[in-house]
Amino acid sequence: MFPKSQRDTTEEISPRQLQPGLFIRLPAGWVSHPFLFNQFRIANDKQVAILQSLGLASVTYVPARSTAKPLPLAPSSGPVPAPEPPRQLDIQTEARRRSDKLSEQRARIAECEKHYLDAARNIRDGMRSIHADPEQAVFVAREMVGGMADIFSAEADLVIHLMSDRVVEDNPHYHPLNVMILSLLLGRACKLLPAELRVLGEGALFHDVGKYRVPDSVLRNPARNRHEEEFYRLHTLYGGELARSMGIFPPQAIAIIEMHHETLDGKGFPRGLSGEQVSLAARIVGLANRYDNLCNPLREDQAITPAEAMTHLYRTEQGRWGKELLESFIHTLGVYPPGSLVQLSNGNVAVVLAVDQSDLLRPEVLVYDPDIPRSEALIVDLAAAQEVKVDHVLPPRDLPPEVRSYLAPRHRLSYFHGGGKA
């Protein structure tokens, strides 16, 4: 079902009837007017004057979202005066400014995706050479992890970006990257020291290295029998053995590899450890791994949205990870994690592209607008659009196919970090 706001009854009124408090929808794309959105509640007389200067024959009015009623239309009223040239020039200038801003946003996203591809390439090359030249593989990975740990240790705010389908689908190593990024984020929230973050990142990146000794027929089987499941669960110990045999992994990183499936309640594997037997670092990586597997399961039809994953973890898995750690994780990724479909307060539907650690309730979103091609879709930083906020999260199944296709909720969710907003 489409969000209720999209089914509101509408009326066509004359621009002469506009006044503050009316919720309106404009027929033209955002490049044809100076407003950020095509639908909004009129805030003041200045906006009324601008709307009346656009030369529109009529304006769509939404009674249910309005706090005022249209002005009465006097029978003797004539046509709306033509817009003044300076005001039209202002509209063009504002449209150019927003177009330039959009270009900057897209360039920033492209730069982030480039860094992601470089990191995924390093992981791919390292994993391929882990047996032939383990010292070199670990050295390259350690350099990458160290650089990221330094970034996450810094005081500056971080922006967590959603990667595009193209980038993720072209890289089979999105999972260790996801787990490493999410683990470093959570480790930072837990106030781990820089040296501890480096070890955490190393353990997270290599947490599944033992799977190289498990056949794909077992790994990629979502309906493993008891014997296959027992074999699968040994990947944690295989990973620990491999890491230990290299002689270059710190003991804390080996412990993460071996314990990332252990849980506080003693129901994890392979040893069924519980409570303080499971290190904080192992729980951090285990939680990041669990979250990513909920969003990116073997079968795509079983995937749940980021918001649903957060709700599931908090409501049903506190015993595994601990309430305090889960609350830190939710606060770290925000109420609206990247990839969430959201209803905005002005009625628009959008997908969350990025979350700024400094303002978790106001993410950056890509807005659905059927009048604008997706390649030119509006990207809005809600921190800079204080008049609009996120109302609530939307399940993809509640949206029409054309909206889902436009917003393209990712088949595979993957994240990377960028600098704070300018």
Image: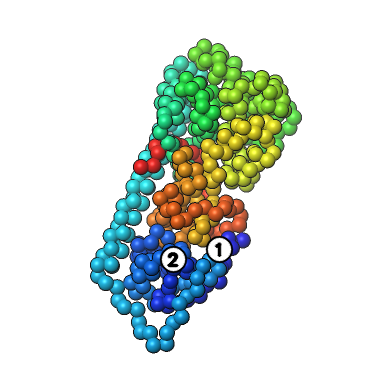
User: Which is more N-terminal, label 1 or label 2?
Assistant: 1
Query: Whole-percent x and y of residue 185?
Result: 50, 32
Query: Whole-percent x and y of residue 106?
Result: 37, 47
Q: Residue at x 31, y 59 (%)?
A: 94
| Label 2 with label 1: CB-CB less than 8 Å | no
304 or 96, which lies in front?
96
Callout 1: 10 Å neighbours few (<14), some, many (20+)? some
Q: Where 63 falls versus 225 (above or below)?
A: below
Q: In which quarter of the image is residue 2?
A: bottom right
Instruction: Residue under label 2, please give it.
Output: 42
Instruction: Residue under label 1, please give it.
Output: 5
Determine whether, in the image, residue 51 is placed left or right of residue 294. Answer: left
Query: Whole-percent x and y of residue 333?
Result: 53, 39
247 or 82, which lies in front?
82
> Does residue 218 appear in the picture of this structure?
no
Q: Which residue is drawn at 60% across and 36% down?
A: 327
Q: Where 101 falls versus 68 (above or below)?
A: above
Outermost residue on the right side: it is 226
How far apart, in angstroms, are the residues tagged by discs 2 and 1?
Answer: 17 Å
